Image (cartoon, coloured by chain):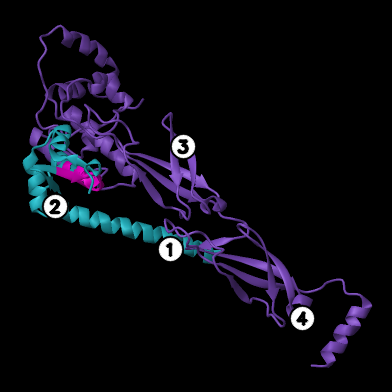
């Protein structure tokens, strides 16, 4: 992975006003993946959206990591289901007319 | 501008203590937080309301003012002037869970928009937009300019997009508060029905009329597809309702370049009308040959 595809974890923490230990905890918990380059920790850009949501859920709603993991899993399932519903609605519409 | 009952919004009693307010706010915030309801506009609205209610009721001074004036909140300006003559106190709470979204005009009239008291960064509000497309617009990947909250945004619409599909544009929502990140823009695609073609997944369905003679004896028919006209062979003795497939003439498969669905054509056989005497005689003769 190129460095331009990643954000230094400490910059992310400064921007969001959080401790670096939070990122370590998420990594230990298997909720995010980080990349270590010469003692520096980087976050892949593809994970930023997910990570920002975790930060909001934890710091705005006081949800612990177990809760966030469950929520994330359910939200992902909900997203797939919503896509399926939209697809099925389109199919149904074609047969209803 | 209507009076807003913040107690009702937080579902608490007027005598509720600070802990009850905090508990009620957290309970509702967890229920209506935009991250937990990404496509629910009503939940976003409700979240803004509970944030506003919490902003007022969790701050003793604001709550006092709100309680004192209640439905006569229009007199709050006079109250405010009196308050300004007293020494100011800092009422910022360390735990501020509010943010995300504007305050109502009611709030701004009474509290002046709650400016300058927050230090926590908050992510901006997510925006939702609907983009209407024709079925023909889904055939190719193209760019379109959208006006969202006065800003022109150029987006790429991938071929094969489906009706009701939502795409997220990161950072195109409302700006964050106190340097927080911007929200996201969710675009829902609404694809209008086509008068001749029905879409099921990536396949298209249409009908083509052929006359009795072509159906019986076979021949050629020109069929319309979404991308132009195609000449097709009709087999002899083709029955009404016969369905044929034109491979690759459906809708492109979303984000899979070079792949497309098929076009299914159902033949409708039109019977001749206003028959001449000679035609009638010939049909009679034919019927006797059964």
- Residue B146, numbered circle: 3
Badge 1 is on which residue?
A: A88
Q: Is residue B41 left or right of residue B95?
A: right
Q: Position of residue A3 (x, y in %)?
A: 21, 42
Q: Is residue B73 visible?
A: no
B211 lies left or right of B74: right
Identify the secondary structure beneath mark 2: helix
- Residue B38 visible in the shown view: yes
Chain of the residue where label 1 is placed in the rendered structure: A
Marked residue nearer the N-terminal end (4 or 3): 3
Judging by colour alone, the chain drawn in cyan in this rendered image is A
Q: Nearer the viewer, mark 1 or mark 3?
A: 3
> Looking at the rendering, in which quadrant would you find the C terminus of chain B?
bottom right
Q: Chain of mark 2?
A: A
Distance from Cα at disc 1 to Cα at disc 2: 31 Å
Residue at 30% in and 29% down: B102
Contact, mark 2 vs mark 4 (Cβ under 8 Å):
no
Say if the magenta span includes residue B128.
no
Mark 4 residue element: helix
Q: Which residue is mark 2?
A: A67
Q: Please give the label number shown on residue B231.
A: none
Label 2 – label 4 distance at C-alpha = 70 Å
Could you tell which of marks 1 and 2 lies nearer the N-terminus? 2
Q: Tell me whether marks 3 and 2 sit on the same chain.
A: no
How many numbered marks are there? 4
Could you tell whether B71 is left or right of B271 in the image? Answer: left
The magenta stretch spans which residues?
A: A42-55
For chain B, the rendered hue is purple
Residue B217 bears which disc, if any? 4
Q: Main secondary structure of the magenta part?
A: helix
In three-dimensional space, the C-alpha distance between marks 3 and 2, rounded to whole angstroms, equals: 37 Å
């Amino acid at each position: 992975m190129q460095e331009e595809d990643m954000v230094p974890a400490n910059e992310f923490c400064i921007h969001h006003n959080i401790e670096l230990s939070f990122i370590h905890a998420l990594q230990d918990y298997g909720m995010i993946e980080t990349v270590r380059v010469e003692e520096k920790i980087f976050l892949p850009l593809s994970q930023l959206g997910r990570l920002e949501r975790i930060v909001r859920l934890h710091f705005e709603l006081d949800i612990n990591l177990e809760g966030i993991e469950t929520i994330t899993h359910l939200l992902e399932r909900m997203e797939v289901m919503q896509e399926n519903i939209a697809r099925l609605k389109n199919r149904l519409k074609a047969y209803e007319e | 501008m209507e009076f807003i009952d913040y107690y009702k919004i937080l579902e608490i009693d007027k005598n509720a203590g600070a802990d009850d307010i905090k508990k009620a706010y957290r309970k509702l915030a967890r229920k209506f937080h935009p991250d937990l309801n990404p496509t629910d506009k009503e939940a976003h609205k409700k979240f803004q309301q509970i944030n506003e209610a919490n902003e007022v009721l969790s701050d003793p001074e604001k709550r006092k003012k709100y309680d004192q004036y209640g439905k006569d909140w229009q007199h709050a300006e006079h109250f405010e002037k009196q308050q300004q003559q007293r020494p100011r106190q800092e009422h910022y709470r360390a735990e501020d869970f509010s943010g995300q979204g504007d305050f109502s005009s009611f709030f701004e009239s009474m509290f002046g928009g709650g400016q300058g008291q927050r230090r926590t960064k908050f992510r901006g509000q997510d925006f939702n937009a609907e983009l209407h497309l024709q079925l023909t617009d889904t055939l190719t990947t193209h760019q379109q300019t959208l006006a969202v909250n006065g800003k022109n945004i150029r987006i790429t619409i991938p071929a094969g997009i489906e009706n009701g599909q939502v795409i997220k544009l990161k950072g195109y929502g409302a700006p964050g508060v106190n340097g927080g990140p911007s929200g996201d823009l969710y675009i829902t695609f609404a694809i209008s029905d086509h008068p001749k073609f029905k879409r099921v997944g990536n396949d298209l369905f249409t009908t083509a009329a052929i006359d009795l003679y072509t159906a019986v004896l076979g021949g050629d028919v020109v069929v319309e597809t979404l991308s132009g006209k195609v000449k097709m062979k009709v087999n002899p003795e083709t029955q009404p309702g016969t369905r044929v497939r034109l491979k690759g003439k459906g809708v492109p498969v979303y984000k899979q370049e070079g792949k497309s669905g098929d076009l299914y054509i159902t033949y409708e056989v039109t019977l001749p009308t206003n028959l001449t005497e000679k035609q009638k005689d010939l049909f009679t003769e034919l019927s006797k040959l059964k």
